[in-house]
Amino acid sequence: MRRTLIAGNWKMNGLTGDGVALATSLADRARSAGSVPFDMLLCPPATLLSLVADATGDAPLAIGGQDCHTADSGAHTGDISAAMLKDLGCSYVIVGHSERRADHDEPDSLIKAKAEAAIRHGLTAIVCIGETEAEREAGKTLDVVGGQFKGSLPEGATPYNTVIAYEPVWAIGSGKTATPDDAAEVHAAIRKDAAVLKDAAFADGLRILYGGSVKPGNAADLLSLPDVDGALVGGASLKAEDFWAIAQATPGA
Ligand code: PGA
């Protein structure tokens, strides 16, 4: 049974005051909610990881990075290694977000190596894949997503150390969301590819998140799809009330 993962990608947002306030508010909600049918993950900017880890304390919230280097340490100015994230209490790291693929020209091979570095250090890699608007309009969605999945999937991927996030690029931060039918089609295709690339047990256990303008108002429709195992949330994860409401849209919550 795949447990729903509700992940918040704060991107390059948050100074110490608001970051701690957001984390504290979510930690309070998570503590008082007790047993819930979802895992909640916060991915603040690296500058806030320590403070967020302190603010969430023993609350049932996981912490993750937004990127990591392929190497464990060394002369890589400005970069952060998976070992450093682990050391701060992270259990996840996002790799291959479309903003990094675009802003930093990250190819699938690099994203795969980053995911492998994450796994080496005991982190779960959230590998992001998704088509642009032009690719969708050209009817290439499944080819593009399938190619990215194959190219970025780390060696030794298991349902425990790897999560896939399908994020159509045109839906990120745009207010446009994939229709449930579109999301269902792509998620099912990814799961089918997972069975071909590895095996049925991997495909069956693999969590595939949807991302791109997920909001309290559309979360229930997306999270109720059989192959959607959670959400990667950007903008709406910056408001405790909205992020919590999205998690509450998990079936059975
Ligand atoms: P969004 O971002 O929810 O603001 O569209 C999602 C993401 O980029 O992970």
Image (spheres, grey):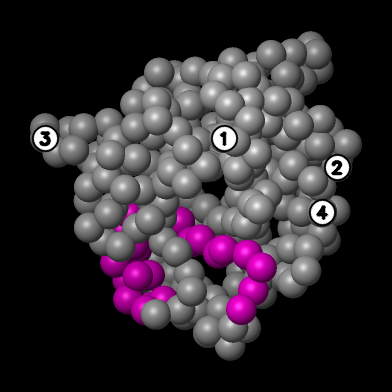
Nearest the viewer among 116 and 138 is 116
The residue to which callout 4 is attached is 224
Mark 4, mark 1: which one is toward the viewer? 1
Q: Earlier in the sequence, mark 2 or mark 4?
A: 2
Image quarter hosting the C terminus: bottom right
| Helix, strand or loop status at disc 1 | helix
The quadrant holding residue 80 is top left
The residue to which callout 3 is attached is 74
Badge 3: few (under 14), some or many (20 or more) residues near its Cα, within 10 Å? few
Residue 226's place in the image compared with 110, above or below, is below
State the residue at coordinates (45%, 64%): 62
Q: Is mark 1 within 8 Å of ligand 1?
A: no
Q: Earlier in the sequence, mark 4 or mark 1?
A: 1
Badge 2: few (under 14), some or many (20 or more) residues near its Cα, within 10 Å? some
> What's the CA distance linking mark 3 and mark 2?
44 Å
> What's the CA distance linking mark 1 and mark 2?
24 Å
What x and y, as percent, mark residue 119?
Answer: 34, 40
> What's the CA distance linking mark 4 and mark 1?
21 Å
The residue to which callout 1 is attached is 202
Q: Confirm or deny contact between disc 4 and disc 1 (CB under 8 A).
A: no
| Helix, strand or loop status at disc 2 | helix
Q: Which residues are magenta?
A: 35-57
